[in-house]
Amino acid sequence: MAESVREAMIKAAWFLIAERGLEGMSTREVLARTGAPRGSVYHHFPRGRVELVELALDHSLQWMQDRINEIPARTPQEVVSGYIDIWRRVVEGTDFRAGCAMAGVTTGGRDPVILDRAQAAFTATGEALAARLEQVGVEPAEAAQRATLLVIAAEGAVILARAWRSSDPLDLVEARLS
């Protein structure tokens, strides 16, 4: 099925935020990447850029939750490796140009609504990881702490991987947290 213009614009905003941060995501660039006409922004997103950013974050969260749910895991170590592998595919697949969209809006954001949405997305990612850890036998309280630590460590590793243009930081987190 063909992707709608609206969905293409949301994905383009998501990619731009992951590549350039919130300050680097312009509606003009979204239009250029999608080939959509100028009036498309306010046609599909009546609240403009803010609404587009919110929906890009929602898309990012859903994408990550889907990837976490796909991790083939029988042990806590496999959950850790699976999550780190998600990020390895992101950074290596973009030649270290893209990272986490939630981090991109957090570091460049000032709008409390956007920051609250990023916080909720980080929390939901941790909850999804904790659920996977519980599925492989980790007690709930321990699973929640491990998941939070994994998100914190992976986010830092993604930033360093991009700066170093190397997956070594991700490898280190995987080795130490597995």
Image (tube, grey):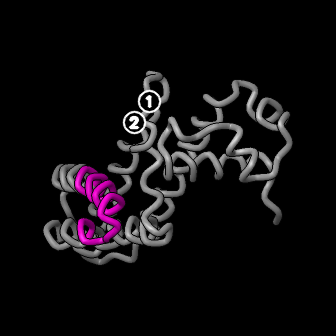
The mark tally for this picture is 2
Mark 1 is on which residue type? Gly
The one nearer the camera, 26 or 102, is 26
Crowd band around label 1 with a 10 angstrom C-alpha radius: few (<14), some (14–19), many (20+): some
**Does 161 lie within the magenta span?**
yes
Residue 59: mark: none
Please tell me which residue is depicted at 57% across the width and 35% down the height of the picture.
54
Crowd band around label 2 with a 10 angstrom C-alpha radius: few (<14), some (14–19), many (20+): some
For the magenta stretch, what is the residue range? 151-170
Residue 72 location, quadrant: bottom left
The one nearer the camera, 11 or 130, is 11
**Does 51 lie within the magenta span?**
no
Q: Which residue is mark 1?
A: 109
If the image is split into quadrants, where does the N terminus sit?
bottom right
Please tell me which residue is depicted at 69% across the width and 45% down the height of the picture.
30
Please tell me whether residue 53 is drawn above or below residue 127 in the rendered image. above
Please tell me whether residue 5 is drawn above or below residue 67 in the rendered image. above
Furthest toward the left, the residue is: 176
Q: Main secondary structure of the magenta part?
A: helix
Q: Which residue is mark 2?
A: 106
On screen, residue 114 versus residue 85, left or right, reads right
For label 2, the SS is helix
Mark 2 is on which residue type? Thr
Please tell me which residue is depicted at 57% across the width and 53% down the height of the picture.
15
